[in-house]
Image (cartoon, helix red, strand yellow):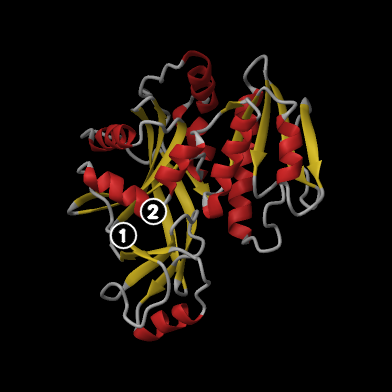
Amino acid sequence: MKILIYEHLTAGGDLKGLSPSLLNEGNVMIKALIRDLSEIRNLELQVLRHVALPPLQEDQGGIQWLPVKGSHPFEDLKEAIQHADAVWPIAPESHGILEKICQMVAQQGKRLIASPALWIQRSAGKYAAFSRLSMNGIACVESHPLKGPSPTPPLPMPFVIKPEDGAGCEGIHLIQTLKHWELLCSSWCLGQEKVAQPLIFGRFLSLSAIFAAGQGVLISCNLQEIDQVGNGFRLKGLRVNARADTDGRCAALIQGIAATFPGLWGYIGIDLVENQEGLFVLEINPRLTTAYVGLHQALGYNPALWIMDLLETGHLPAAPTNAIGPHDLAL
């Protein structure tokens, strides 16, 4: 099988306005995926990568590199899809990018190693996900949709403003004073949808899971190290497989989310905050997340094998047992 790997940022998507941290996350994710897929027999790998970026040192040969020269990689992607059997996209949900890529793959009749575009649209938006999950009794961080600037802050301070379809910590603003709110409103772009969320203190977690047909399997519970930088935030590091789900709460949460979004498929990341009151969903990431990078080392098993087996058989894996232990990632 010929698999096209497309990581949007390292293929040149928005290179000029890209933060170094997001580009670094894109690089480490594509390295990990190439490493894992290279271990699987009977796969041919094609990878789109922008010529402005240095080659990946991990390449041991056997990979067909497709150079991207311009600033709009979708044309190169469209051409490359024609020559692939399946496409594994990694892209931010921002501005509907991941959704558009999945639509392109479906339109050309190729196998998609990701969720269908419709379910990305339904799950990636923070308020859209909050509404569906809350209706199904799943605890979430309260979200309020914002269509534009307002003289009155939407929540008591401090609170957080995020892009409705943002990825990672990009575009997040901590509002602590009325002046901060007024400054944000003065720079608000028309048509830019945001959500307001109360600032909740606790441990920031992410769950790595595999979904299909309304079911989900928890494969790792990860601890996020998030730093406040000015009035924003940055993911500093991760402890992958940080703890066992001894009470079954995380596995039950995965099942509830899978039932709420039955069209989600493949690797899915869930961001949470945990405090004395319980677990609260922050957002759903219907794609590879940075935690994927440490799964192989933490679990002692190649997670890409689970996804490829799901693609071929339709069977979800069993929840992993006998994991090696935590694996730390510094970003």
Tag of residue 183: none
- State whether residue 179 appears in this view: yes
- Decide which of tag 1 and tag 2 comes sooner along the chain: 2
Residue found 72% across the figure and 35% down from its top: 47
Q: Is residue 232 above or below residue 132?
A: below
Image check: 21 left or right of 61? left
What residue is shown with label 2? 126
Q: Position of residue 37 (x, y in %)?
A: 62, 26
- Which residue is at 31% across, 54% downward? 203
Marks 1/2: CA distance?
A: 7 Å
Q: Note whether residue 281 is visible.
A: no
Q: Is residue 33 above or below residue 307?
A: below
Looking at the picture, does residue 323 appear above or below residue 173? above
Name the foreground residue: 109 vs 241: 109
Q: Position of residue 10 (x, y in %)?
A: 69, 48
**Mark 2 secondary-structure assignment:** helix
> In the rendered view, does 127 fall on the left or right side of 61?
left
Please say if the residues under marks 1 and 2 sit with CB atoms less than 8 Å apart: yes
Q: On the image, which quarter does residue 101 sit in?
A: top right
Badge 2 amino acid: Lys
